[in-house]
């Protein structure tokens, strides 16, 4: 069973997938930082607040022992208050749109490159097929054998 597992792990597509997951996680952190630290403050400023993630609706009572701010989404959530965090949802939605847009652009470039390579390969194949192939020169041995044959025929 260990041999089968090693063979499975060492297959190329499993390693490619592992690398993709690692790169994807790092890319996700970059996109999260872009969204949380750059885009959402701008969007929040447009909508009248500096912290867009603090937009929420309280859907239940605050526990009696709670001493934090009633506008702190993270603290209220930690205290167990039922919240509808539409600001956090909007942040995740923006993250998704950014990632989807970048993946779309990457795939678009890959598809265009693949189509270009395919067209160029087909063009080269057509040129190769259209070019007349010169017959290979006759080997010296064949030429000598023909001369001998013709000489023998001439002698009768």
Image (tube, grey):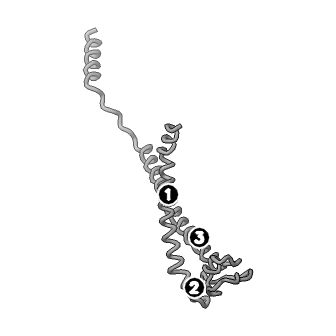
**Residue closer to the observer: 138 or 1:** 1
Q: Position of residue 124 (x, y in %)?
A: 43, 49
Whether tag 1 and tag 3 are in contact, CB under 8 A, the answer is no
**Mark 2–mark 1 distance (CA, rounded to whole Å):** 32 Å
Q: Which residue is mark 2?
A: 51
Above or below 3: residue 94: below
Q: Of residues 94 and 64, which is closer to you in this image? A: 64
Considering only vertical position in the picture, is 63 above or below 31?
below
Q: Earlier in the sequence, mark 1 or mark 3?
A: 1
Q: Residue at x 55, y 69 (%)?
A: 101
Secondary-structure class at tag 2: loop
Name the front one of labels 2 and 3: 2
Neighbour tally class for label 1: few under 14, some 14-19, many 20 plus, Cα within 10 Å: few
In what element is the residue under mark 3? helix
Residue shown at 27%/13% (left/top)? 154
**In 3D space, how far apart are the residues under numbered discs 1 and 3 (Cα atoms)?**
18 Å
Q: Are marks 2 and 3 in contact (CB under 8 Å)?
A: no
| Drawn side of residue 80 relative to residue 24, left or right | right
x 60%, y 73%: residue: 92
Percent position (x, y) of residue 109? 49, 63
* Label 3 sits on residue: 96
Residue 40 at x, y = what percent? 56, 81
* Front in this rendered view, residue 65 or 84: 65
Q: Which residue is mark 1?
A: 20
């Amino acid at each position: 069973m260990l041999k089968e597992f090693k063979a499975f792990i060492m297959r190329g597509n499993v390693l490619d997938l592992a690398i993709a997951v690692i790169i994807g996680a790092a890319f996700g952190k970059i996109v999260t930082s872009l969204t949380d630290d750059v885009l959402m403050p701008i969007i929040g400023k447009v909508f009248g607040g500096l912290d867009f993630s603090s937009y929420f609706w309280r859907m239940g009572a605050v526990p009696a022992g709670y001493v934090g701010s009633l506008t702190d989404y993270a603290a209220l959530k930690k205290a167990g208050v039922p919240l509808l965090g539409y600001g956090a949802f909007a942040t995740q939605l923006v993250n998704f749109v950014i990632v989807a847009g970048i993946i779309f652009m990457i795939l678009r470039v890959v598809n265009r490159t693949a189509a270009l390579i395919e067209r160029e390969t087909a063009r080269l194949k057509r040129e190769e097929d259209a070019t007349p192939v010169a017959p290979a020169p006759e080997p010296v041995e064949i030429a000598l054998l023909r001369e001998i044959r013709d000489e023998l025929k001439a002698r009768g």
